[in-house]
Image (tube, rainbow, N blue to C red):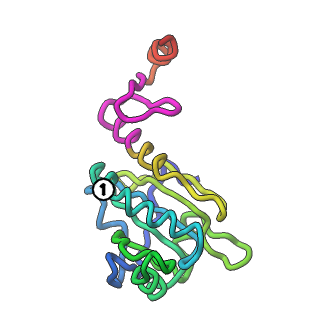
Amino acid sequence: MLVGKKAPEFSVNAVVNGVIESEFSLERYLGEKYVLLFFYPKDFTFVCPTELIGFQRALGEFEKRDTAVVGCSTDSEFCHWAWANTPQAQGGIQGVTYPLLADINKEVAAAYDVLAEEGDQVAYRGLFLIDKQGVIRHMLVNDMPLGRSIDEAIRMVDALQHFEQFGEVCPMGWHKGEEAMAPTHEGVSGYLSR
């Protein structure tokens, strides 16, 4: 369980907006941005492009929330580069601009405890919301055939930012703009009586 702990550090090669970059680390965001780090099994597969393209389509929503989106798989930077330069109509993810980490040694997936130990040893669909201090505040791990909800990822960013700004906790199904509750028994009673 990594929630409440400092996000594991790493430095790996990455593809950023179609260009290979060496020694990419999340430290560049520390104190500046929230980070949504997500893991996916493999490039050039079936469910993965729906998620990567979906995150790209929602990138503006994350940017409005001061949140960097970073993807990671155990593929090489060269595989990422080829996939990022393949048109979407041909199974590629051309147009994805956020960083894709090349965890070829599987150390990042292992550090975040999302590395499958059987088969090809690829990453499960892990998702981690990291605050500006580098602390993991939310995590979700899906098995490989189960795609995740980008709307839920945005909701989690909103909930964290609401808590940080107002000190109010966010009940089940809460969305930005809705009433939250004071973290006291009185606040809970008042909220539930509505």
- Residue 119 located left or right of residue 27: right
Q: Which residue is mark 1?
A: 60
Image position, residue 111 (x, y; %): 55, 67
> Quick check: 185 above or below 22?
above
- Residue 189 located left or right of residue 134: right
Neighbours of disc 1 within 10 Å: few (<14), some (14-19), many (20+):
few
- Residue 177 located left or right of residue 77: left
> What residue range appears in magenta?
158-182
Q: The residue tagged with tag 1: helix, strand or loop?
A: helix
Image position, residue 177 (x, y; %): 34, 31
Which residue does the image show at 33% across and 51% down from the upper left?
61
Which residue does the image show at 39% across and 79% down from the upper left?
14
For the stretch drawn in magenta, the main secondary structure is loop
- Residue 166 located left or right of residue 109: left
Depth check, front residue: 161 or 4: 161
* Residue 109 sits in quarter: bottom right
The furthest residue to the right: 118
Which residue does the image show at 37% across and 51% down from the upper left?
131
Which residue does the image show at 34% across and 76% down from the upper left?
16
| Residue type, label 1 | Gly
Image position, residue 141 (x, y; %): 60, 56
Q: Is residue 174 magenta?
A: yes
Q: Is residue 92 magenta?
A: no
